[in-house]
Amino acid sequence: MTGTWATFGADLHLDLAARAGAPGLRAALAEALREAARSGRLAPGTRLPSSRSLAADLGIARNTVAEAYAELVAEGRLTARQGSGTRVAARARPRRPQPGAAAAGAARAGVREPRARRGPAYSLVPGSPDLSGFPRAAWLAAARRALAVAPDAAFGYAVDARGRVELREALAGYLGRARGVYAHPDRIVLCSGFAHGLTLMGRVLRERRVREVAVEGYALDVHRDLLAGAGLRTRPLWLDGAGARTTDLAGLGPRVGAVLLTPAHQFPTGVALTPERRSAAVDWARTEGAVILEDDYDGEFRYDRQPVGALQGLDPDRVVYLGTAAKSLAPALRMGWMVLPPDLVAPVVAAKGPVDWTAGALDQLILAEFITSGAYDRHVRGMRLRYRRRRDELVAALAGRVPVSGIAAGLHAVLDLAPDTERELVRSAAAWQDLALEGLARYRHPDSPMPARDALVVGYGTPSPSAWTPTLTALASALP
Amino acid sequence: MTGTWATFGADLHLDLAARAGAPGLRAALAEALREAARSGRLAPGTRLPSSRSLAADLGIARNTVAEAYAELVAEGRLTARQGSGTRVAARARPRRPQPGAAAAGAARAGVREPRARRGPAYSLVPGSPDLSGFPRAAWLAAARRALAVAPDAAFGYAVDARGRVELREALAGYLGRARGVYAHPDRIVLCSGFAHGLTLMGRVLRERRVREVAVEGYALDVHRDLLAGAGLRTRPLWLDGAGARTTDLAGLGPRVGAVLLTPAHQFPTGVALTPERRSAAVDWARTEGAVILEDDYDGEFRYDRQPVGALQGLDPDRVVYLGTAAKSLAPALRMGWMVLPPDLVAPVVAAKGPVDWTAGALDQLILAEFITSGAYDRHVRGMRLRYRRRRDELVAALAGRVPVSGIAAGLHAVLDLAPDTERELVRSAAAWQDLALEGLARYRHPDSPMPARDALVVGYGTPSPSAWTPTLTALASALP
């Protein structure tokens, strides 16, 4: 018996023995293979052993195996191609979910869709980068370099719960120069994306007897749900053109021990938190001994004005900076990072629990090489150009029809609508333009103090390049 | 401003402005770079922009930048190499943890070491494969093929909480032929290794009002801890040369709703569960409506006798099969799989929670290609030869000195010792032979019914090829 075909071979033996004296070994073997393919024991695409090797395993003549293979090839159950060997033929597969609206839908912030839905053909639902932009060749080149130099120990169980030191060092350098984050490798903890980081912080805050967390009046519902799941009540802050009114934090009372903010590019309204409000948040955190959670989800993509650095630089001992590769590279990498005040490193590591589900070490090593080689900068630069062009086309296409805001950065814009028209517009766009849109309403905190605002949150990063122009046309047709 | 150097550039501007009139732009720029490297804002290895590009960003002459770079190269703070650009020079790094005993130590079963310890030079602590055996070139080749054909949607948020269909199909085929598992892709759920799978099952069992889980009298303490963490009491089964005495299950009472077994190769004693005891377990599960958790951690590595298939094949509707790539490929992949009875698929998916931390989709696609192309079979075959040779050398080296058992499969053997000598032998091996060993005692369930047994659990898979011979010599010297 060679290889993992051993059990399979043993069963075949039995089969063959049971049929001894029957129409011969060749037919018995062919039928055993047929049955294995039918039942799924041999999956489509599986490469079969060479006829020589299987014959040796089964103790029968090579020719018998070759003839049985040929029989199944003739029946279309196996395929035989030069160089690719004999494989089980592909069957009709269950239909894969579409890459369109459903996937992008509830996907924001690292939360997966419970099951695939068939959505409209076009989608401007925010939360996804243009997935066709993933730098396959550059990533593979980084993988080659990273695998060439990785120490053997890198393939073993992790020895540092914070994650590979190579990636923490690369991120420290990158976040320092690109986002103004004070990020020593020792205070970086890798996680599986923003949602994982927020879950860990929720546990840590709860252990510290924090009962309530202030959030922005419009924000991701899934983030509120994660905090609620950790036993924390969320309290909405007034949100206007200067960002969240952090000057109100002191008035929320002593039960509020943290605030969750998107300072560089508020999600979903797209405004930047002003310097005054940044200072107010930090002052409050210092006075109250509270923590600021900074969600820097698309900080790389800023187009017009001076770059807006991270809030964390103002007080690295009060701000937990959370970043992710989901928007800049791919959500599928499940890769995020936290830059922590020194006293929070040990509690966050403890919150990970005895089992760490952070992304595999190979991807950590590859991303480290991707960053230090400069490939990450090049990729972000290229994607920024792509998104900026789309943004400009979006603004031009809608010129004078609806007010467009939140467009200095990121992958989404806000289109203001006449009062009480949002829900109907989203509905009719899906029905008549085959276009998935999302309104502002679903992001509104139930206790939000501001008057409701009818608007669309348009994720112009979502379409693939080929879908972009028809998607934009569909949007223009859908608007009043 | 180009690229992610924007914020860094803005700071430099301020710096340069503040120093205007001073010794000149070149010195100011050089000092700013020096400071950035010192403070860690520019990490070692970071590639700087070309002098042309940085000069354009800063609005100064290219020559000024080139001269500042040259100054820092001369100081050893930057390196400039043809084709690799100008980079921040490497500094002395904090010492990396050794790949030796510490990493292998508490590592078994996907549980990471809380912090690196400096262990003895040689290690036979069980739980780790030979990490030097990771098939770097073949893995990279599979990555190239997988990335070439992956649909764009694969880079987005997951649409199926069970994991990528490509990998579930590949595993269904592989597990069917190699392990005799009945494994339709629909009933496979990917997880981050055995410990993650056990955690999910712990949650599901608890929700179903299960209070107690039977375990083997000797077993991994970390698995008992995970079950205890889910609120489940563990009840030890008598363990002998035929495996766990599953005939005792019925006598444990109705609070026991599941049993955790290692049927193919008991960990740590190394015996295989006999057919009679397999049947007894399945009969009990059917009668009581209970669940069998099958930990098939090293099923690929069997050397002598007929292959021992998975217990799951006996009753796929009563057995939860748990497998992992940790022993066959690398623990660092964080990749495991569960083959579930149909009625448990939805509860396990729900137990994953709103955030799924399963390994990144790229690794899932690569492993799928690795399996279907036949590379996995080839790799397992090669490693099996390597481990088998070691096992034979181990047995030969100890011939007649101590009884060696549990050697028909896997990556570890059990060496029986005289009563009350285990602890002292482990201590003296570390002290005198610089050799990390592990005794059987730590695996004993506190309520275990059997008399204690003094023995060593020798993980001969752990050493690298170059360390193997001196490690074996150290072991031979350490034994009485």
Image: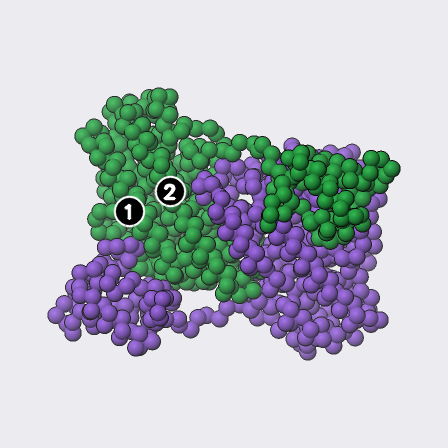
Chain colours: A purple, B green
Mark 1, chain letter? B
Left or right: A368, with A245 as reference point: left
Q: Which residue is mark 2?
A: B129
**Can you see residue A433?**
yes
Residue situated in front as seen by the camera: B114 or B13: B13
Instruction: Identify the disc placed on residue B471.
Output: none
Q: Quadrant of residue A57?
A: bottom left
Q: Which residue is mark 1?
A: B385
Circle 1 — which element?
A: helix
Q: CA distance from mark 2 to mark 1?
A: 13 Å
Left or right: A29, with A298 as reference point: left
Which residue lies at the image location 80% right of the left edge and 49% below the top edge?
B59
Badge 2 amino acid: Pro
Q: Quadrant of residue A419?
A: bottom right
Residue situated in front as seen by the camera: A180 or A278: A180
Q: Residue B379: x, y in percent?
A: 35, 52
Check the image and report above or below for A313 versus A458: above
Q: Judge the density around disc 1: few (<14), some (14-19), many (≥20) Cα neighbours within 10 Å.
A: some
Check the image and report above or below for A273 versus A62: above
Which residue lies at the image location 21% right of the left edge and 60% below the top edge?
A56
Same chain check for tags 2 and 1? yes
Left or right: B283, with A446 as reference point: left
Left or right: A449, with B121 as reference point: right
**Can you see residue A262?**
no
Q: Judge the density around disc 2: few (<14), some (14-19), many (≥20) Cα neighbours within 10 Å.
A: many
Residue situated in front as seen by the camera: B402 or A478: B402
